[in-house]
């Protein structure tokens, strides 16, 4: 490392950002004014963690403590925006980047005085190691000279002030270090006044007092040295009820006896070389890089009177996370010159094994790296009554040997003594189940010779310099290893499939796996498969996950009880959501609070913080999507049953159904330019801004939410909410049709149909049967289509529902057309057109025109087809419905093909193909590819025609459209005949005719029959 350039004497220049004193920002033009209050707090927080993401929630806590306004997140955004402008206007080289879940400040390391200070301290350590103590002392003095007062002096945030207090500790440690170096160099005469001033400012800091005593003694002022001791002793007794520490008492005895070891000439400055790291782990850091100088030498040779050994038991069957164990150990044992106190925060959901992981790491490092002891406390962060830092410090001080009566009352005084007692000792502090940064801050040692291992369900992003380790569920093999360690590998080998099923059933959650394995170990006569069967019953799954003291329900309950009431209620209601991933706005609907927050995710974040739900991705708008671990979902459902009544659950389910229905109906209007068949189910409207965002690309949004929407229909039907179920199902049908999700279409409609029939809901039955009729048409199942549509038509007639009647008659017309009965089809199309005119539905009339065009073309009435298609195209363009426009273009292409206008047909169909692809219309794409193939076959481009037919067939097969695939095969057979491949054509036609005969598709069957007749002719034409 090169020398660190520190010039504290020049106060007119320096790093652009200064926190070692009042917060300052400098540019080439001079000081940059930063508004007092929020702007200063925001900038300070970003500077202290420069290069690391600062969570927006943490910034809110710094700015408003426990009482943020509803607009807090918006105000943070405004503050960030203003800060960006301020820095940009002043040409300060800094960038604030938005990076979920907050912001990160990017600056050069030399642009912050705190970074310059820490680099200087690290350089001083290296100089000592190279045998240059005088240069090291000078570097440290210059580094300390960067301070212009207490860190962030005057900044108006108590939480930030606590962080700054820890940074000020670094200044005092560096000061003690250069004084110790200079005393060893014989500069005691020059140092007495300086050290005396430091003692008066820090009267309880024993290391300064010891340095003053040594400087006075070596200056021939033995009586004053002893008086300094007596003053310190009296102060400790009066203020804290304590005696001086062992180091000071030993130094007093040495002065009284004029111990020869205190003479400078007999205490050479020895530089202790660092031990070489072992192959498995990094070496332990020395307790100080000044080890070997006078006072540290005496401390190192004294046996500690109290060595706490408080770690909980290590777990013999620990499995997995080897890389994370090594990562945590590397942080805690780092020997880097710039190292501060090693802090590792272990995150993860309840039952993931955070405490077990911490115990494993702590035991591995206890003897080799932290021989002076290990402190441990369960902070009860998941409970309603987490331990106060003051109480924890009292426990730790007693464990360190401080008598009970000597422990002061105040948190601040306990913290000072605690940090003093840990100074230069190698102690590991394990803080299990921390609730917040505020609970942890007072428990951090001031010495970098110590290490801190924290477990928490929250991420504790505000702990300065902390390294975070996030535990996830165990993989399948790790899960099997854990089961095998407990029950015996032979049982796993005898029932490998059952063991895999066990691991999958509990989702790799270590606590659940241990419980399952422990129960099986206690019952060697139980087969593993029996436990799989027990866990399969969701209503009893949590009851089965209990063994002795271990219980998943109790583990999750600790976290649950620690949540605010509204967050607990939301978690319970979220268990009503069936999908594997869901959007944030759902929280507003479940709580019936559309204005809860301008940001839908805000309601979810408290549950994410404690990992009761997870962020599993993001939607197209960048909004996070959330999900449950299966066992947490079961727990939430368990709490819902226990803590809510049927009316609350029903109301929440209706709001959720109404919200999905509102969004789907609006998506329909965005896509079709109009609505569909509506019922009486009340809507619940999500926030307008969110609706506008998610429906900017409605087909993409529908695709993203397909699982949630389908499962919601099924859930509503199961719960007897027939009005919501049928209306949501039929409004989803056009989307399912466009995307080719025919199975989703069928499943949702059948579930909803059962519900409406049970309740005698005639409108719901009619709408669902009409929609199912359209589904059967897509599958070319004409018999089922006719049956469903006929019943639906009768119901709509009874209800006097013109739109429903028109839709049934139009689709029955399609049935007749495909069956080859053109006259019946035309009559039905005419009646449908009249129905749609009665209800003023121009889009529906356009859909009739498109279907009628196929019959008119077959009859040769091309002029009428052309005129009507022009009319339909105008209707669809006015409504902005791409799917309708594409259908018109397809018929126009067929018209051009009929007239022999092949190039016009190719252009129109190519345009239509681009349109359906842009719209994600899979079924429409199949139709366009087929017609384009026919055009190219007529153009004589057999290779391109074959390629288009092949792609059309692939589309049909992908959506399991047997009838559509058979239609394509007829055209492929025609192409094969033109190429002289009679055998290939015969095979294709044989398969297709079976399908047509089964489905009653007369029109297609006649086409196939014509080609079969050509096959039997004595010669095959080779025409184009």
Image (cartoon, rainbow, N blue to C red):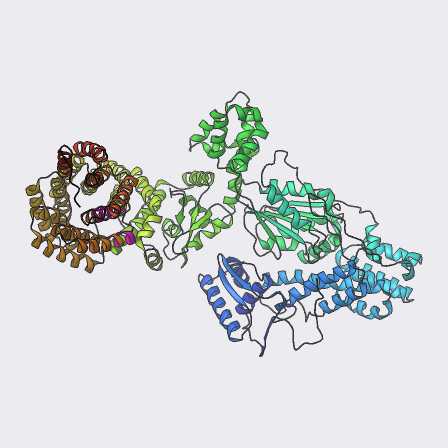
Along the viewing direction, whichever of 772 and 934 lies nearer the viewer: 934
Taking the magenta stretch, the answer to whether it contains residue 564 is no
Q: Residue at x 51, y 70 (%)?
A: 83
Q: Residue furthest bottom?
A: 29
User: Is residue 85 rendered to the left or right of residue 670?
Assistant: right
Image position of 557 with respect to 878: above or below:
above
Residue 234 visible in the current orientation: yes
Identify which residue, 764 or 702, lies in the foreground.
702
- With 333 as the anchor, is 604 left or right in this view? left
Residue 187 image offset from top left, x and y in percent: 85, 67
Residue 434 horizontal/vertical position (percent): 59, 48
Q: Residue at x 7, y 46 (%)?
A: 859
Q: Is residue 926 magenta?
A: yes
| Foreground of the two, 541 or 492 | 492
Q: Is residue 357 left or right of residue 718?
A: right
Q: Which residues are magenta?
A: 915-933
Where does residue 673 sit, x and y in percent of width and height?
Answer: 22, 56
User: Could you say which quadrant of the image residue 999 lies in?
Assistant: top left
- How would you classify the magenta stretch by its main secondary structure? helix
Please give left or right for residue 619 compared with residue 418 in the image: left
Q: Is residue 882 visible?
A: no
């Amino acid at each position: 490392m090169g020398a660190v350039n520190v010039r504290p004497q020049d106060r007119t220049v320096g790093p652009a950002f200064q926190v070692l004193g009042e917060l300052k920002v400098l540019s080439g033009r001079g000081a940059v004014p930063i508004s007092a209050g929020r702007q200063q707090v925001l900038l300070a927080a970003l500077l202290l963690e420069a290069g690391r993401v600062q969570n927006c929630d943490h910034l809110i806590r710094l700015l408003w403590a426990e009482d943020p306004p509803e607009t807090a997140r918006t105000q943070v955004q405004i503050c960030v925006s203003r800060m960006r402008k301020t820095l940009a206007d002043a040409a300060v080289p800094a960038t604030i980047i938005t990076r979920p879940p907050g912001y990160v400040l990017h600056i050069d390391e030399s642009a912050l005085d705190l970074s310059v200070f820490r680099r200087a301290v690290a350089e001083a350590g290296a100089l000592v190691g190279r045998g240059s103590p005088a240069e090291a002392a000078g570097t440290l003095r210059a580094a300390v000279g960067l301070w212009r007062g207490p860190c962030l002096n005057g900044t108006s945030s108590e939480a930030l002030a606590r962080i700054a207090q820890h940074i000020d500790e670094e200044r005092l440690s560096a000061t003690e270090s250069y004084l110790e170096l200079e005393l060893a160099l014989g500069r005691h005469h020059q140092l007495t006044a300086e050290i005396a001033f430091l003692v008066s400012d820090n009267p309880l800091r024993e290391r300064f007092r010891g340095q003053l005593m040594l400087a006075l003694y070596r200056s021939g002022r033995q009586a004053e040295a002893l008086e300094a001791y007596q003053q310190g002793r009296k102060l400790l007794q009066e203020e804290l009820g304590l005696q001086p520490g062992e180091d000071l008492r030993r130094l007093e005895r040495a002065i009284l006896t004029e111990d020869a070891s205190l003479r400078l000439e007999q205490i050479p400055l020895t530089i202790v070389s660092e031990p070489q790291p072992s192959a498995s782990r990094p070496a332990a850091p020395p307790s100080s890089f000044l080890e070997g100088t006078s006072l540290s030498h005496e401390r190192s040779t004294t046996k500690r009177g109290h060595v706490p050994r408080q770690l909980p038991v290590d777990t013999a069957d620990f499995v997995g996370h080897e890389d994370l164990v090594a990562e945590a150990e590397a942080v805690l044992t780092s020997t880097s010159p710039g190292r501060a106190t090693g802090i590792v925060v272990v995150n993860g959901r309840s039952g993931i094994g955070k405490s077990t992981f911490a115990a494993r790491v702590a035991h591995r490092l206890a003897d080799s790296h932290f021989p002076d002891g290990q402190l441990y406390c369960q902070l009860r962060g998941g409970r309603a009554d987490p331990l106060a830092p003051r109480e924890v410090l009292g426990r730790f001080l007693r464990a360190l040997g401080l008598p009970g009566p000597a422990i002061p009352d105040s948190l601040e005084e306990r913290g000072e003594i605690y940090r003093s007692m840990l100074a230069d000792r190698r102690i590991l502090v394990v803080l299990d189940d921390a609730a917040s940064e505020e609970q942890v801050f007072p428990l951090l040692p001031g010495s970098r010779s110590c290490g801190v291992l924290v477990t928490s369900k929250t991420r504790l992003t505000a702990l300065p310099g902390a390294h975070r380790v996030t535990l996830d569920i165990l993989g399948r093999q790790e899960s099997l290893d854990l089961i095998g360690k407990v029950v015996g590998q032979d049982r796993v080998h005898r029932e490998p499939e059952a063991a895999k099923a066990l691991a999958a059933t509990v989702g790799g959650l270590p606590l659940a796996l241990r419980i399952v394995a422990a129960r099986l170990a206690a019952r060697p006569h139980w087969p593993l498969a029996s436990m799989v069967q027990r866990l399969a019953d969701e209503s009893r799954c949590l009851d089965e996950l209990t063994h002795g003291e271990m219980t998943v329900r109790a583990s999750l309950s600790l976290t649950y009880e620690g949540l605010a009431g509204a967050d607990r209620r939301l978690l319970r209601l979220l268990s009503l959501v069936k999908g594997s991933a869901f959007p944030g706005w759902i929280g507003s609907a479940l709580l019936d609070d559309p204005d809860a927050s301008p940001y839908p995710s805000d309601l979810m974040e408290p549950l994410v913080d404690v990992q009761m739900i997870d962020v599993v991705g993001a939607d197209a708008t960048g909004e996070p999507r959330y999900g449950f671990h299966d066992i947490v979902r079961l727990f939430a459902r368990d709490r819902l049953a226990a803590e809510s009544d049927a009316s609350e659950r029903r109301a929440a389910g209706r709001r959720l159904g109404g919200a999905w229905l509102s969004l789907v109906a609006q998506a329909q209007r965005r896509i079709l330019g109009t609505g569909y068949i509506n019922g009486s189910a009340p809507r619940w409207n999500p926030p307008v801004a969110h609706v506008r965002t998610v429906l900017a690309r409605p087909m993409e949004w529908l695709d993203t939410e397909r699982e949630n929407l389908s499962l919601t229909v099924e859930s509503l039907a199961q719960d007897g909410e027939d009005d919501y179920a049928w209306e949501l199902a039929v409004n989803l049908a056009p989307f399912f049709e466009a995307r080719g999700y025919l199975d989703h279409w069928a499943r949702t409609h059948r579930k909803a149909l059962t519900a409406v029939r049970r309740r005698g809901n005639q409108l719901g039955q009619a709408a669902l049967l009409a929609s199912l009729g359209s589904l059967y048409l897509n599958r070319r199942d004409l018999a089922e289509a006719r049956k469903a549509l006929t019943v639906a038509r009768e119901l709509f007639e009874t209800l006097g529902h013109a739109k429903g009647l028109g839709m049934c008659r139009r689709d029955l017309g399609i049935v007749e057309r495909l069956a080859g009965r053109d006259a019946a089809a035309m009559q039905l199309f005419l009646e449908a057109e009249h129905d749609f005119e009665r209800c003023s539905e121009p889009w529906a009339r356009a859909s009739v025109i498109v279907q009628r065009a196929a019959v008119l073309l077959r009859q040769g009435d091309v002029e009428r087809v052309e005129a009507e298609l022009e009319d339909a195209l105008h209707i669809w363009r006015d409504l902005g419905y791409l799917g309708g426009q594409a259908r018109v273009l397809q018929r126009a292409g067929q018209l051009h093909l009929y007239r022999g206008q092949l190039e016009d047909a190719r252009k129109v169909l190519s345009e239509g193909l681009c349109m359906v692809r842009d719209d994600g219309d899979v079924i429409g794409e199949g139709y366009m590819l087929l017609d384009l193939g026919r055009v190219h076959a007529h153009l004589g481009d057999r290779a391109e025609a074959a390629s288009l037919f092949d792609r059309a067939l692939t589309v049909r097969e992908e959506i399991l459209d047997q009838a559509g695939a058979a239609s394509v095969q007829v055209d492929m057979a025609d192409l094969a005949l033109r190429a002289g491949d009679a055998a290939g054509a015969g095979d294709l036609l044989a398969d297709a005719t079976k399908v047509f005969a089964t489905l009653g598709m007369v029109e297609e069957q006649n086409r196939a029959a014509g080609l079969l007749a050509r096959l039997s002719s004595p010669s095959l034409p080779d025409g184009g």
